[in-house]
Image (cartoon, grey):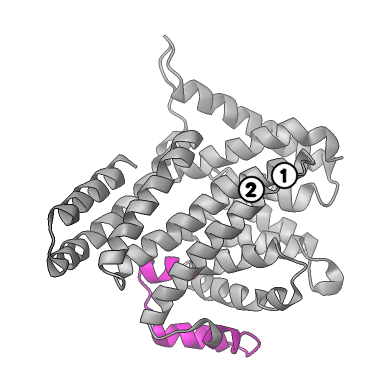
Amino acid sequence: MNKLRLAVTAITLGTLLSSCSTFNKMAVGGAGDLIYTSGNGVLHESNFDVFKDGLPGNLILIEGLLAQSPKNMDLLATLNKGYAGYAFAVNETHMYEEEWAELKSEEGKKQALFNYTRSLNFGLRYLKEKGIELNDIISRMNEPQGIHLLLDKKMGDDKRDLEIVLFTAQSLAVLVNIQKDNMGLVSQLPAAKGMFDWVCLKDPSINYGTCDIFYGAYEAGRPQMLGGNPAKGKEIFLKAIAKHPHNWLIRTSYMQFYLIPQNDEEGFKEQMLAMKGFHDEFQKYYIYDQNPKNESAWTRESGMRFYQTLSLKRYELMNRFQKQFF
């Protein structure tokens, strides 16, 4: 986070000090890769509130840089990923809290819709620069390998291209999921899945189990009459937990999308007990006291630290409301 803030601040000051638009574009263009790469530093963040309060300002600054260089692919990718990440981590968590507390407020849902839409739009701008329109994807979503062949033709295999398709697919899928009363929008879900399929075939372990969370929720979250397969969803989640044991977000997603809807109280309690252990270890590791810190296997996975942080936030919410789940 600090690296990203420093990079953005330095380039922003440079553009403000210059009145030459050509110079601005050159400065921004040269910094785009640095900003995109530095943005991954947020995955090392261990404080949910620092992420929640700090990321919006960075995203606004990057939007200002993009205005100077509207076709900068690194900036488009950073904003696509940043707004999707913020919507998932902050807005969706707020949305679940409102839902489980049975509040009349839907501020979390509203902000999730806004930020996922913004992420989607930046992703579509990136894809347009690659020669792909949303209609190109939608028109092929029911063709065997239609989306796959389109993306293979237009996109590369590098991380930036894979992530742009991943987060654009995530944004579209969630926009569909939280607007299920809009049947026209629901009909676009196969487009999101087709994009996920393309990414996950090329890199099944991208972002420490993101594909598994999507497929587990996709199978568990749909009724069997609509093609869902809860048993398959459960299997996907359990295999992912074994494969990525330190990404605790897979566990909380398993609880949320399978165990609670399937009324599996025993399985829920088992996962909650595991999460309590992680929660206690995390608190001891990050809060100073006089005792020496014990290194655990999860502490060495610094690249997934924010996934762990978010999972503990979701665990705390589930712990508050678990009596009403069963």
Label 1 CA crowd tier, 10 Å (few <14, some 14–19, many 20+) = few
Residue on which the image places disc 1: 105
Task: Decide: is 96 above or below 76.
Answer: above
Image quadrant of residue 51? top left
Amino acid at dot 1: Ser
Residue 164 is inside the magenta segment: yes
Residue at image coords 43%, 65%: 163
Q: Residue furthest front?
A: 19
Residue at image coords 44%, 55%: 82
The answer to whether 40 appears left or right of 139 in the picture is: left
Amino acid at dot 2: Gly
Q: Which residues are magenta?
A: 136-165
The image quadrant where one finds the C terminus is top right
Residue on which the image places disc 2: 108
Residue at image coords 25%, 61%: 33
Q: Position of residue 89 (x, y in %)?
A: 55, 47
Does the CB distance between marks 1 and 2 fall below 8 Å?
Answer: yes
> Is residue 250 visible to us here?
no
Q: CA distance from mark 1 to mark 2?
A: 8 Å
Task: Decide: is 96 above or below 281.
Answer: below
Give the camera-side residue of 229 and 294.
229
Residue 197 is inside the magenta segment: no
Q: Position of residue 219 (x, y in %)?
A: 73, 65
Q: Position of residue 174 (x, y in %)?
A: 63, 62
Image quadrant of residue 170? bottom right
The answer to whether 45 appears left or right of 314 in the picture is: left
The image quadrant where one finds the N terminus is top left
Q: Position of residue 201 (x, y in %)?
A: 52, 73
Q: Secondary structure at mark 2?
A: helix
